[in-house]
Image: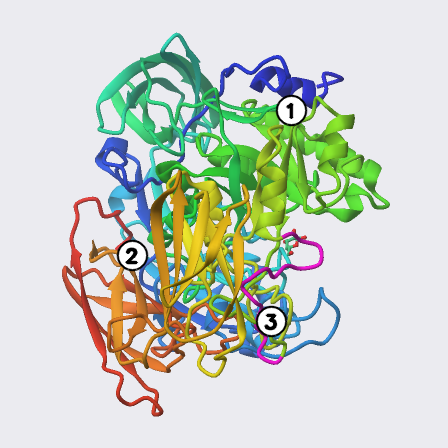
Amino acid sequence: MADITRRTFILSSAGLLGSCLLPRAIWAAGIGAPRGPAWAASPGDEALAPREQLLFDFGWRFSLGNGADPNKDFGYGFGQGDFSKTGSFKIATSAFNDSGWHALDLPHDWAVELPFVHDDSGDDDTRLTSHGYKPLGRRFPDTSVGWYRREFEIPESDRGRRIWIEFDGAMRNVALFVNGCFIGQHDDGYTPFRFDLSDFLNYGGKNYVVLRVDASFGDGWFYEGAGIYRHVWLTKMDPVHLGRWESVVRSTIKDQSAALELATIVQNDGEQPADASLEWTIIDAEGRTVAQATSPAQSIAANASGHYQATASISNPALWSPDEPHLYAAIVKVVVGGSVRDGERVPFGIRTAVFDPDHGFFLNGKPLKIQGTCNHQDHAGVGAALPDRLQSFRVSVLQGMGCNAVRTSHNMPTPEWVEACDRMGMLMMCETRHMSSSPSGLQQLETMVKRYRNSPSIIIWSIGNEEWILQEGEMAKEGERIAATMVERCHELDPTRVVSAAVNGNNEQGVSNSLDIIGFNYHLEFPDKFHAEHPKRAVFGSETSSAIATRGEYKTDKTKYTVSSYDGVVPWGESPEQWWTFYGSRDWLAGGFAWTGFDYRGEPTPYGWPSISSQFGIVDLCGFPKDYYYYYKAWWTKAPSLHVFPHWNWAGKEGQQIPVWVYTNLDEVELLLNGKSLGIKQVPRLGHVQWDVTYAPGVIEARGRRNGQTVLVERRETTGPARKLRLAADRAEIDADGQDVSMITVDVLDDHGRPVPTANHALSFRVSGAGKLIGVGNGDPNSHESDKGSKRALFNGLAQLIVQSTGQAGAIHIEAVSEDSAAPSISSASLVVKTKKTSAAVKRVS
Ligand code: GAL
């Protein structure tokens, strides 16, 4: 694009110019595989016929292999035979007996099942800290390779269709074999990939698919899991079909109506030319048709493709926003000779998104501060293999503190996370893993942009994070070129969104010169100066804070590897109050993304072993809030909010000073100890109030006032000993589809029914009936208990169970029992979660 620079290009297309505060045309469209809204039928539903997209998650067998010894790796690489003749790979034929492999369903992360290994040899890049002390890497050949195998049938009636196996992602280096034939490989751990199996299948009989997944290499410096940790699909289509991720819906809003530009590509994989026309039906969230369009027939030669366009308009469109995430869907059908040959459903939203250098971010023409968090993709109990419902759970936890945006640090996200953000109204900065314009770097970027460019939640593409060498190092000049190529490719595929990167530095050279908008990681000393010197460049905080805290701990204790909840922060970071006071009080800053929303495995800062997870989260690994969750809640939400901490169980500290903090957005707070006032304090904007209180058991009470009226009162009471366990489900009824989960919180109460915040009792669980226990956690960064066992201690009063339906309608019975011999008097708890069959269940490979 010669010397229309990337920046002028995006300035004109997305309205970044200072003078242009009015929303400009923004193209927004949707993603596949939706679940949830009434209109969003499952993949494989009738509306898309004759296309079938079948979930291929169930009925697999798995075995660990070996990265060093072919004798322990099913003979793989023993000689030259594996690839020498097509059809000769025995493991993927009926000749192989996999009865010694164990049965499982996907998604699956074998790393989370491995024991923790204390290995601190080497430097930061080679130690096991990044993996959270899970033994992955070439030094751990016994646990770094996994094999997956499945038998499946293809009916005779499928002959003539194109049949793909599609992976949403696998960690990492996949080699795929079908019916004895080597089919292909895929290297990186985050992009989806697929293979056309049509020529290799046995129609009307049995077929065998085998994957060797090698997680010896990682893609990042954080816990990444291992195995097929995202969904797998078997997709069957007519030879004349829509191109993958080629359907795009873009909208321009004018005079109370949205003009839609519709585009796609039809591929003819058949042997004859086809005269194909297109039908577009736009439906709203209730499934009502709101617009229709057609694209006239084109003759597409065999093995060729045709580009199609159409326009439509929607009057009085319901705009997408975090408060009201209205979605539409375009149903695209390919018609040949009067019959429908293929179809797909493209969810999209209608909205404008503009970054302004002087006034920050605007959604639908209104200023909106980005109140964001960065997040990795793992969770307690399941590692990187999250059931879909858990994505929504995580979004709702973040929304509870007013978070309105997430950054998919540092990789292409799983589809269900993006879908949850679209459906629930969470903005996204969507990041690719490798900053590179090499063929593989561009391939990763292109896949991400094409896959998600219809998603209304995404407002920024990120081409990478903290690439020191390309930024300020010896390759800064090359960095500028590499970034320029990546930015240009994003614009070609999606001219509606800005492109940025997360830069740890002054943004004055290298990569930064090629970006549309400027993201600062940390370093509050840089943005003001940058803004003064580059007044036409919009700025946001791509990564901020890195505050650290152990949930429920109020002392930094190096012998217990805990971090105080008052104001822990790493040397390069800022407390929540420090960074938000900065970003929240400058209109020209668009807001930012705190590191991190959730704790994650790996990067066990500040201690290393025996800590196995990070402590950066605003919530812990389970999603239980740390105290500073309520700092954000106070200043990121409008409703009155008040939180007083710490707990008031300080036996043995009578007469000693205990700091008591209050996070609130009210005007003033009065603190009382056992009914006696300790004074009233005015709340500084974006700040907090605190007292030093001489400890006496009883009650501390914070009374928050606005305009002289008491609006909220919060207490912490000294509890008695733990007496009775309690179980609570986030959802009392779930789908009987073998995938849905209920998130169960476990706590323990005293004689007066008060939760005991310091309880750490050992517990065990029994789950029976129409469900199973797929993971346990407690948010303790130092716990080495298994995520997969049926035991887990409470950590500072809390534990979490993830219970999944097994496919039967009925009831899941859950029981929690104390195993603590020192506290025999704690009574057990039980709970029932119902499971019910729904018609919306995704069709699957039988
Ligand atoms: C940043 C980096 C993150 C994480 C964080 C910890 O520099 O981008 O991935 O490592 O530091 O503070």
Depicted 686 relative to depicted 134: above or below: above
Circle 2 packing at 10 Å, graded few (<14), some (14-19), many (20+), is many
- In percent of width and height, residue 540 lies at 62, 35
Magenta portion: prevailing SS class: loop
Q: Quadrant of the N terminus?
A: top right
**Image height of 675 relative to 427, above or below:** below
Kindly report the distance in space between the C-alpha atoms of the residues bearing marks 2 and 3: 40 Å
Residue occupying the point 75% across, 42% down: 525
Is label 1 in a helix, a strand or a loop?
A: loop
Residue segment shown in magenta: 559-574
Residue identified by numbered label 1:
357
Give the residue drawn at x 75%, y 18%.
2
Residue 665, percent across and down?
Answer: 45, 44
Q: Vertically, is 344 above or below 106? A: above
Farthest residue, direction right: 474
Look at discs 1 and 2 and give the one toward the viewer.
1
Q: Nearer the viewer, mark 2 or mark 3?
A: 3
Q: Earlier in the sequence, mark 2 or mark 3?
A: 3
- Which residue in the protein does label 3 denote? 556
User: At x 42% / y 41%, what residue is drawn?
Assistant: 637
Q: Quadrant of ligand 1?
A: bottom right
Q: Nearer the viewer, residue 813 or 611?
A: 611
Residue 126 image position (x, y, % from top left): 70, 68
Q: CA distance from mark 1 to mark 2?
A: 45 Å
Amino acid carrying label 3: it is Thr
Position of 534 with respect to 274 (left or right) is: right
- Check disc 2 and report the residue beneath it: 739
Q: Which amino acid type corresponds to the residue marked 2 in the rendered image?
A: Gln
